[in-house]
Amino acid sequence: MGLVGWPLAHSVSPRLFRDAFRRAGLPWRYERFPVQPNGLARLVASLRAQDVRGFNVTIPHKQAVRAFLDTESPAARAVGAVNCVRIRNGKLWGTNTDLAAFVADLRAHRMAASVRGKRVVLLGAGGAARACAFGLLSLRPSELVIANRDLRRARNLAADVRRAALSPRRRVRVSAVALRSASPKIRRAALLVNATSVGLRAGDRLPISDAFLRAPLAVYDLLYNPPVTDLLRRARLHGCLAVGGIGMLTRQAAAAFRLWTGRKPSPGAFDPVNLGHHMITKRR
Ligand SMILES: NC(=O)c1ccc[n+]([C@@H]2O[C@H](COP(=O)([O-])OP(=O)(O)OC[C@H]3O[C@@H](n4cnc5c(N)ncnc54)[C@H](OP(=O)(O)O)[C@@H]3O)[C@@H](O)[C@H]2O)c1
């Protein structure tokens, strides 16, 4: 098993899975497979040929990896992104465990109920943002604003979400804006979600003005390393409930464990508390 992405230095997944396999008494390994986009096809072909049960997929390959799969789950098809692949008899099956993990973590932090009938601003339009957008749809906001550096990508995601939201039960206004113009949209929002990779590198800063980070806005940052990102720090300073992505990470990882092993994780496995300061020391 392993993690396919670039960069991978920040990832705590190897540590999580090694701990979970040890607790379950499984002699399995979990490796980092760092690969840039031009090497993805070759890497996937080599994993298919080896005795590998599956792998996780992270930045920037969650959409591109779909081209190499034999089949995928309805969740992966709906979201248009795959973060977990199972290999059986040389056949690759992809699914998306980010969506359910994101919604479950919002619920666990009591951030989900406040979304209903309200505006949500989602930063990002990559693989993770796609899962968040469809997850948010299930919480019935009145409006979803998707903000991305590449506006064309935000528009594409908005169009996909609009198509999914066509049923009267799910009527929601969906719009796309450039990331640099997102701040005023946050004013009347109940929830701001950061699903960009801004914050991964020290000194990264989202172009979001502090003037709009005010309670009762809640902020969820998918980044989990560092545990307190610049966005979370600023939001907390202004009284917002602000939560990082470690709970989402551990929930999607536990789902991958169940898919690969057919077992429930042992008690204590995938517990964020066990990660401790590792998250800080692993920064680039
Ligand atoms: N907690 C969890 O369980 C969890 C799960 C999944 C992902 N994540 C995190 O979520 C983040 C996004 O992952 P992903 O798979 O969606 O990656 P991705 O598909 O590569 O998308 C990256 C996103 O970040 C934006 N971005 C990158 N650099 C930027 C910059 N300098 N300024 C502004 N925007 C920038 C991209 O905008 P453009 O389209 O304009 O390039 C795009 O929206 C990663 O940090 C990942 O670690 C966390």
Image (spheres, rainbow, N blue to C red):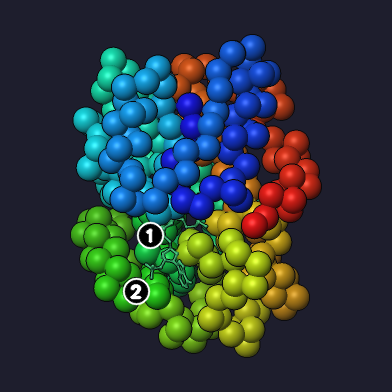
The residue located at (51%, 26%) in the rendering is 257
The residue located at (61%, 50%) in the rendering is 10
Q: Secondary structure at mark 1?
A: loop
Label 2 near ligand 1 (CB < 8 Å): yes
Would you place residue 247 above or below residue 194 in this image? above
Q: CA distance from mark 2 to mark 1?
A: 10 Å
Residue 71 on image: x %, y %: 23, 31
Residue denoted by label 2: 150
Residue 191 on image: x %, y %: 54, 67
User: What type is the residue that disc 1 sits on?
Assistant: Gly
Label 1 near ligand 1 (CB < 8 Å): yes
Q: Nearer the viewer, residue 33 or 13?
A: 33
Residue denoted by label 1: 126
Relative placement, left or right, of 37 versus 226 is left
Would you place residue 61 above or below residue 52 in this image? below
Would you place residue 79 above or below residue 219 in this image? above
The residue located at (28%, 40%) in the rendering is 41
User: What type is the residue that disc 2 sits on?
Assistant: Asp
Q: Nearer the viewer, residue 39 or 189?
A: 39
Residue 60: image quadrant is: bottom left
Is any part of residue 98 visible from this angle? no
Residue 215: image quadrant is: bottom right
